[in-house]
Image (cartoon, rainbow, N blue to C red):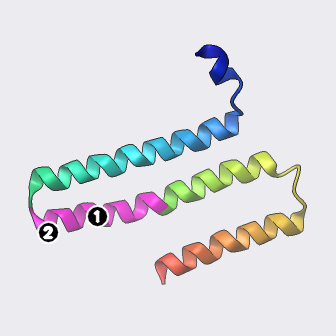
């Protein structure tokens, strides 16, 4: 098992770890909604999750871009950054 973990790229491991943490937060929120059994509290929990999703996306994209920064040209990095900005703009507008 240890040999398998050593063969994984650290950036990929960090990105997967962030997604697993996000999944744990989402699952915990779903269980809290069921435990409270109240629409108002469920909406409040759901509102808190609206912050978690984009934050995890930004962090995972940042980790990936930093690991690829030496392989990509500035124009391609700019296009990726523009794409992320457009996604965030679409989410919040």
Q: Where is residue 81 in the image (x, y as percent from the top left)?
A: 72, 68
Badge 1: how crowded within 10 Å, few (<14), some, or many (20+)? Answer: some
Residue highlighted by disc 2: 40
Identity of the residue drawn at 49% across and 76% down:
91
Identity of the residue drawn at 69% across and 21% down:
6
**Above or below — where is 64 with respect to 17?**
below
Identity of the residue drawn at 61% across and 15% down:
2
Q: Position of residue 10 (x, y in %)?
A: 69, 33
Q: Where is residue 31 in the image (x, y as percent from the top left)?
A: 21, 48
Per the image, is 49 magenta? Answer: yes
Badge 2: how crowded within 10 Å, few (<14), some, or many (20+)? Answer: few
Alpha carbon distance from label 2 to label 1: 10 Å
Cβ–Cβ under 8 Å for marks 2 and 1: no
Direction from residue 3 to residue 27 in the image, left or right = left
Identity of the residue drawn at 47% across and 42% down:
20
The answer to which of marks 2 and 1 sits earlier in the sequence is: 2
Predominant secondary structure, magenta span? helix
Q: In which quarter of the image is residue 50?
A: bottom left
Residue highlighted by disc 1: 46
Q: Position of residue 52 (x, y in %)?
A: 42, 57
Which type of secondary structure does the marked residue at label 1 adopt? helix
Which type of secondary structure does the marked residue at label 2 adopt? helix
- Mark number, residue 20: none
Quick one: 56 or 6, which is closer to the camera?
A: 6
What is the total number of numbered labels drawn onto the structure image? Answer: 2
Q: Magenta part of the protein: which range?
A: 38-53
Direction from residue 56 to residue 62 in the image, left or right = right
Toward the left, the furthest residue is: 37
Toward the bottom, the furthest residue is: 93
Toward the top, the furthest residue is: 2
Which quadrant does the N terminus fall into? Answer: top right
């Amino acid at each position: 098992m240890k040999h398998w973990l050593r063969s994984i790229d650290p950036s990929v491991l960090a990105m997967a770890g962030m997604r697993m943490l996000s999944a744990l937060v989402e699952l915990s929120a779903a269980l809290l909604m069921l435990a409270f059994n109240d629409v108002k509290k469920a909406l409040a929990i759901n509102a808190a999750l609206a912050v978690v999703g984009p934050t995890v996306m930004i962090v995972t994209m940042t980790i990936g871009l930093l690991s690829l920064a030496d392989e990509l040209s500035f124009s391609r990095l700019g296009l990726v950054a523009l794409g992320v900005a457009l996604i965030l703009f679409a989410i919040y507008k």
